[in-house]
Amino acid sequence: INKNDRIIKIIIHKYKENIIINMIDNGGGIPEDIVPKIFEPYYTTKYKSAGTGIGLYMSKIIVEKNHQGKLYATNIRDGIVFSIILNSMI
């Protein structure tokens, strides 16, 4: 992917009683064997000096514990979608 063609889209919509926030990029996605691990504490694919592996874990905790929502990651054709689902009735 040419760095001039990088795209991040944020799409927010309401579906029934939920607010859905989708963050979509075209960065090539995440290897399928890694996707289930990315929300685990201290899991990182970077060098130890470049990351702690705590960011996505904390994001999931905040969404689920503080907002009673869900956070998912799904590979798409040329990137990934991170979806946050929140109940709009809370």
Image: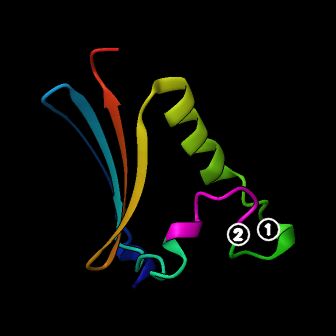
Which residue is at 85% across, 71% downward? 48
- Checking the image for residue 88, the label placed there is none
Q: Residues within 10 Å of mark 2 (few under 14, many from 20)?
A: some
Which residue is at 71% across, 56% downward? 41
Per the image, label 2 sits on a secondary structure element best described as: loop
Give the position of the C terminus as an image quadrant. Answer: top left
Q: Residue under label 2, please give it.
A: 44
User: Which of the marked residues, 2 or 1, is nearer the chain's N terminus?
Assistant: 2
Magenta-drawn stretch contains 37: yes
Give the position of the N terminus as an image quadrant. Answer: bottom left
State whether residue 27 is above or below residue 63. Answer: below
Which residue is at 31% across, 79% downward? 78
Per the image, label 1 sits on a secondary structure element best described as: helix
Residue 47: x, y in percent?
80, 76
Q: Amino acid at mark 2?
A: Thr
Asked which quadrant contains residue 88, the reply is top left
Which residue is at 72% across, 53% downward? 54
Residue range highlighted in magenta = 36-43
Residue sitting nearer the eye, 65 or 2 = 65
Circles 2 and 1 in contact, beta carbons < 8 Å: yes
Magenta-drawn stretch contains 75: no
Residue 43: x, y in percent?
71, 66
Which mark lies nearer to you, 2 or 1?
A: 2
Q: Residue under label 1, please give it.
A: 50
Residue 85: x, y in percent?
33, 38
Q: Outermost residue, right direction?
A: 49
Residue 13: x, y in percent?
19, 36
Q: Main secondary structure of the magenta part?
A: loop
Which color mode does the image show?
Answer: rainbow
Instruction: Kindly report the distance in space between the C-alpha atoms of the residues bearing marks 2 and 1.
Output: 9 Å
Q: Amino acid at mark 1?
A: Ala
Asked which quadrant contains residue 46, the reply is bottom right
